[in-house]
């Protein structure tokens, strides 16, 4: 079950980002997962529930956005959507294709509770700029 290893990496990243933002807890993690990864949604959810116990993410919601496979034909250069098993170009019938979407796995967002200056709690998002820098945005920043 490779979903457990995948979820370990996702949860490690989310917890590090939340801790850097001084979050009180993680409310929701949203992921984009390509169909070609062959990840099973139920196995990801189960792994998340088990691994998040006794962490800032315990009780958080995990949202999985599936990304359908999309390829480009190397002969006619047209892009097309397809299922996991049929990558033949529907335009020229070529089997010479390159997968351009459907293999990704990314953390789209992490919603957290941030401490409020008035000793309360405010909601916020922890985002990454892709270069390792994490920032927290509270709803009052908008």
Image (tube, grey):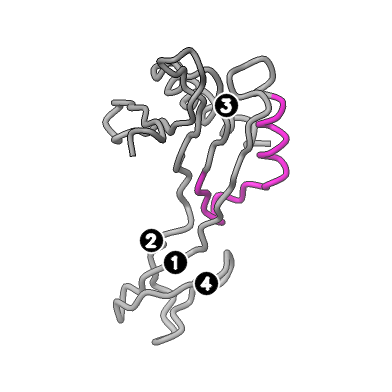
CB-based contact (under 8 Å), mark 2 and mark 4: no
> What span is in magenta?
31-50
CB-based contact (under 8 Å), mark 2 and mark 1: yes
**Residue that carries the numbered disc 3 in the rendered image:** 8
Q: For the N terminus, which image quadrant?
A: top right
> Quick one: label 3 or label 1, which is nearer the N terminus?
3
CB-based contact (under 8 Å), mark 2 and mark 3: no
The x and y percentages for residue 18 are 46, 22
The x and y percentages for residue 70 are 44, 66
70 relative to 66 in the view: left or right: left
Q: Where is 5 relative to 99, above or below? A: above
> Quick one: label 2 or label 4, which is nearer the N terminus?
4
Q: Where is 34 relative to 78, above or below? A: above
Magenta stretch containing residue 35, yes or no?
yes
The x and y percentages for residue 56 are 58, 19
> Quick one: label 2 or label 1, which is nearer the N terminus?
1
**Residue that carries the numbered disc 4 in the rendered image:** 82
For label 1, the SS is strand
Rounded to the nearest angstrom, the CA distance separating label 3 from label 1 is 27 Å
């Amino acid at each position: 079950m490779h979903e457990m290893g995948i979820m370990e990496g996702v949860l490690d990243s989310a917890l590090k980002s939340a801790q850097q933002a001084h979050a009180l807890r993680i409310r929701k993690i949203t992921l984009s997962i390509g169909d070609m990864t062959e990840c099973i949604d139920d196995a990801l959810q189960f792994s998340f529930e088990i691994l998040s116990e006794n962490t800032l993410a315990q009780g958080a919601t995990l949202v999985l956005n599936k990304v359908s496979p999309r390829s480009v034909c190397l002969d006619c250069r047209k892009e097309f959507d397809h299922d996991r098993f049929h990558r033949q170009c529907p335009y020229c019938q070529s089997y010479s294709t390159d997968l351009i979407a459907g293999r990704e796995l990314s953390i789209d967002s992490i919603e957290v509770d941030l401490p409020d200056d008035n000793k309360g709690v405010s909601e916020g998002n922890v985002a990454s700029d892709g270069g390792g820098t994490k920032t927290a945005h509270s709803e009052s920043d908008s």
